[in-house]
Amino acid sequence: MRKFSLTLLSSFFLLILIACSSAEDQAPQVGSSGIPVSQTSPASDVSSPQSPDGPRYGGNLRIAQPGDPVSCDIAMSRGVGYQSVHPCNPMLSQIVRASSADHSTITPDLAESWSVSDDGRTWTFKLRPNARWHDGSPVTASDLKFSIDRVIEPPEGLFAGRAAPIAGYVSSTAQVVAVSDDTLTITIDFPAASFITNLANVYVSIFPKAITEQLDPPSMVLHEDVIGSGPFKFSSATRGSFYEMVKNDYYYEPDLPYLDSLTFLVIPSPAVRVAALKTGEADIVMLLTEPEAESLAGDSDRIRLIREPSAGGNSVQMNLAKTPFDDPRVRRAVNLAFSRSDAILALGGGFDGAIMPPGGPWALDPDEVSRLPGYGNDESERSRARELLANAGYPNGLRVQMHSRSDPFSTSLAEFAVAQLSQVGIDAELIPLERTAYAEFVSNGQHTLISHSHSFSLDDPDAILPAHYACGGAENFPGLCDEEIDRLIELQSRETDPRTRKQLVDEIQRLVWAADAKVWFNWSVRRTPVSVKVMNFDPGGPSLYQGRRFESVWLAE
């Protein structure tokens, strides 16, 4: 069986076909980017204001985030987090990308055009003649091949991160060919509806072959090391303080970017980030909790608050290899312990769903979601949870350790999870870990129970299912390994009929949910406050990661 690795937009034609299918009568109304229109908060503002005078050149945009980027080699596993992607993405380019205006549409980037053979397997990409690296040297098809090859066969000591779905379509680097300086072909193993979508994933970024090969290890780790082809290039940085980029004069769009510079401010404290926005020392804060968002209510004349559904959320995950979670009765008790209505109230909003983002084209029908274990009557389900624990040998409850990241947002989620579990007699001792230590702890399988919040980079089955639910998936932290689930994951990837594929994805969702290994208790609302002087800012649609290169953003003053 073909092995799958890691992570997430669905292709445009699939989105249109599924949205127009008979399921439309049952599913939430969705917008072009998969956002459930009927569930969008009335306070949401996802519009992009335009200056009456049109775009204005110049100025410095300041974005506040909690920490430093770990690695700007976002194609590799060390760079998967948003704190790496956000300050590194403006320096990078892709072969193709998701449209910043409509995240379900694939648009040119380094490739100005592309075509596919009649059998659906060979894709040919023609490069822009004016694509240049930050040092002025030309981007060639050899650079594109090098960047795709290292995802298929990562250098020693490196592991592909959320770019890895590409390796699920291309089994050998020999299938990636630089035909000439301006032409690249990729021959995939089978016709795949999601190939071009996953190629447009922000994580499939392109690096210069000659420069990257000289690094030891061969990876763009530090912000200041990046030689990219994006709209901005490195200027200066002080770890723990700021990362500054300036306009790239070699950018292939000659009239862009509008801004002179970008500065990412490292501000660990949420309260200080909000204060910086209020005092005008920052222009954008990427993530807020609901209480922090409410604190901006008196600043609506100076700050726009964008609320929108997120392709991500909050879960507890159990290690199936460790007692007591090797017992399915205990895992089901954990699922039944959570009140999804309590989660929405406590966490300032959210949405009910299975394992694909609710409201998107792959979501399980809401009526069926409402009948899943964990979405029933809270008290009767909690009573059943206590009964299951007793049958499993824990009539007086049990005590376990729960690990989480140590940042305030993650800790608050974990505290909510601890309180929910206590309702059925599960006493979870919360142990927060620093982000890097947590990642290593979980990846090495040392955990028993974790509270875990994350967002997908694409709402696409091939970007989500293999990494999170297939045997050996890079983000399959529970260690779920089910032969039938693996078979269906591979089958849906090869299915080109959208309705049949949707049926397969639905069946996978049912099987995964029944395993009670990764228990989703809340699909999130993302809150992004932006200064009113920031024009044409796209908050990124449902994904936390896509579409933020800032080349089309300008400042009204």
Image: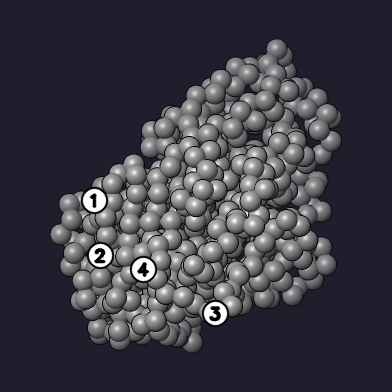
**For marks 4 and 1 on the same chain, the one whose residue lies earlier in the sequence:** 1
- The residue under label 2 is 227
Mark 4 or 2 closer to N-term?
A: 2
Whole-angstrom CA distance, mark 3 to mark 2, is 34 Å
Mark sitting earlier along the chain (1/2): 1
**Rendering coords of residue 260 (x, y %):** 36, 68
| Label 4 – label 2 distance at C-alpha | 18 Å
Horizontal side of 277 relative to 37 (left or right) equals left
Query: Crowdedness of circle 4 by 10 Å Cα count: few (<14), some, many (20+)?
Result: some
Q: Quadrant of residue 378?
A: top right
Q: CA distance from mark 4 to mark 1?
A: 38 Å
Q: Give the residue at x 60% y 55%.
A: 303
Which of discs 3 and 2 lies nearer the camera? The answer is: 3
Q: Secondary structure at mark 2?
A: loop
**Residue on which disc 1 sits:** 156
Q: Nearer the viewer, residue 182 or 498?
A: 182
Please identify the quarter of the rendering in which residue 380 is found.
Answer: top right
What residue did someone put label 3 on?
A: 53
- Among the two numbered marks 1 and 3 on one chain, the one whose residue lies closer to the N terminus: 3
